[in-house]
């Protein structure tokens, strides 16, 4: 069979959807929308096999005619040596393999379930497709129904599809550029993610926090106390709701959150101001289980919804529970002279700067204790006195 049937100039003029041969197994597929992908076709017995080689003129890693021919020749050489290039694996087969491999690194059952759910539900159109034949168009069509409606979940799904295909590439089950890579062409085919996501969590301006705290203290109920405690400690809602008795050393005024309950998977020690200690002591006296902030039913924690309602009732507007952490961070940056790394350590953020990270390893506990006491004092000030001096 003749080779080198195509030329760059001819390829640029191809607009009609179809498959165009360059010879000896190398083909260019032109889609109705104008996109163009290279692929290699060969047979073993009666079985037809297809290997994707990447998109022509697409994204940050376009495959030129010359590169496509180079990739095709490499495949021909492997075939000549009798290698079985592609095993009969579907996306679902490889997906199961990836989850099995990653299970060892998952911090908890919830994370494992999220991987399984997103790939089972949202990547379902890919399940029966041979992993070697999945194209960028397949990925786009899979993501389109959810890309604008649930953008955060859609992008997580995209990243997990990419992880499955990367796994397949590492095993020789897929050849070519990963069609689920954002910079590999998807950014030209789907709306930009930052235009679809919620952005920052709404926060209470820190100058208004004393008024919010005063109204929380005037309210009765476990939810109000839990929100106040979250504000005092700059803790995440889930960390507060899941707090148990054994995590507290009230004589030392410390709250030690184990790795499995932390977003970063690292133990976090929180120095407690006096008011936070008082809240925990009172909550423990009321609770009938290991949970500190127990809900209406014995052994059941309070809900995130209940905490949000308490925050709204305290005049926080549309602020979120997570936004309380932003209120604290803004106060620390604008109102105090504490170093950035001390404030970041209080939020249990993972620091990428090596110097800051080295400082963080010591947890800066005493500095953080001073800072959290100052924050608690600030929150007790009358609103009119709370602005920076």
Image (tube, helix red, strand yellow):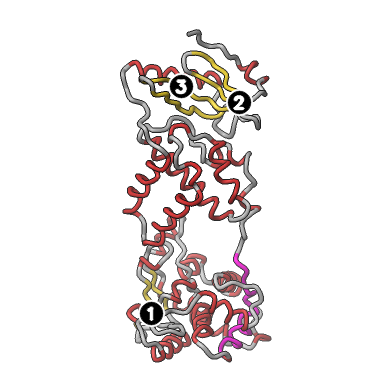
Q: Which of 26/197 is in front?
A: 26
Percent position (x, y) of residue 172? 37, 32
* Residue at left offset 35%, top offset 50%: 102
Percent position (x, y) of residue 159? 49, 47
The reply to whether residue 389 is in sight is no
Q: Which residue is mark 3?
A: 41
C-alpha distance separating marks 2 and 3: 15 Å
Residue positioned most to the top: 2
Mark 3 crowd level (few <14, some 14–19, many ≥20, 10 Å Cα): some
Up/down of 118 relative to 134, above or below: below
Look at the numbered discs 1 and 3 and tell me whether their residues touch, using CB distance below 8 Å: no
Asked whether residue 269 is drawn in magenta, I would say no
Q: Which residue is mark 2?
A: 30
Apparent side of residue 383 relative to residue 227 in the rendered image (left or right): right
Q: Which residue is mark 1?
A: 254
Front disc: 1 or 3:
3
Instruction: Identify the mark nearer the N-term, 2 or 1.
Output: 2
C-alpha distance separating marks 1 and 3: 65 Å
Q: Quadrant of residue 215?
A: bottom right
User: Label 1's element?
Assistant: strand
Percent position (x, y) of residue 178? 48, 36
User: Label 3's element?
Assistant: strand
User: Label 2's element?
Assistant: strand
Quarter placement of the C terminus: bottom right
Provide the residue span drawn in magenta: 201-217
**Magenta residues, dominant SS class:** helix
């Amino acid at each position: 069979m003749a080779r080198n049937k195509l030329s760059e100039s001819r390829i640029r003029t191809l607009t009609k959807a179809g498959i165009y041969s360059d010879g000896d197994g190398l083909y260019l597929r032109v889609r109705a929308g104008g996109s163009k992908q290279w692929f290699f076709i060969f047979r073993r017995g009666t079985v037809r096999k297809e290997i994707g080689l990447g998109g022509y003129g697409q994204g940050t890693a376009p495959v030129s005619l010359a590169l496509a021919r180079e990739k095709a020749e490499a495949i021909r050489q492997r075939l000549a040596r009798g290698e079985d290039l592609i095993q009969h694996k579907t996306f679902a087969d490889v997906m199961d393999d990836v989850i099995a491999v990653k299970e060892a690194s998952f911090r908890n059952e919830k994370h494992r379930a999220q991987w399984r759910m997103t790939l089972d539900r949202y990547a379902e159109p890919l399940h029966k497709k041979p992993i070697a034949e999945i194209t960028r168009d397949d990925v786009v069509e899979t993501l389109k129904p959810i890309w604008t409606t649930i953008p955060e979940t859609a992008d997580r799904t995209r990243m997990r599809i990419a992880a499955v295909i990367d796994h397949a590439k590492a095993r020789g089950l897929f050849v070519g550029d990963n069609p689920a890579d954002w910079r590999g062409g998807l950014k030209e085919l789907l709306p930009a993610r930052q235009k679809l996501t919620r952005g920052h969590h709404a926060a209470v301006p820190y100058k208004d926090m004393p008024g919010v705290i005063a109204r929380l203290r005037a309210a009765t109920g476990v939810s109000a106390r839990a929100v106040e405690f979250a504000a005092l400690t700059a803790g995440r809602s889930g960390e507060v709701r899941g707090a148990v008795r054994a995590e507290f050393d009230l004589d030392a005024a410390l709250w030690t959150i184990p790795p499995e309950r932390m977003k970063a998977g690292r133990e976090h020690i929180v120095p407690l101001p006096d008011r936070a200690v008082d809240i925990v002591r009172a909550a423990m006296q009321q609770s009938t289980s290991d949970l500190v902030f127990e809900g209406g039913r014995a052994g059941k924690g309070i809900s995130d919804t209940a905490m949000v309602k308490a925050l709204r009732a305290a005049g926080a507007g549309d602020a979120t529970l997570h936004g309380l952490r932003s209120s604290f961070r803004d106060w620390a940056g604008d109102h105090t002279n504490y170093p950035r790394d001390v404030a970041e350590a209080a939020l249990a953020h993972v620091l990428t700067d090596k110097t800051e990270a080295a400082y963080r390893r010591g947890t800066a506990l005493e500095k953080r204790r001073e800072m959290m006491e100052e924050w608690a004092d600030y929150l007790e000030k009358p609103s009119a006195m709370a602005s920076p001096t």
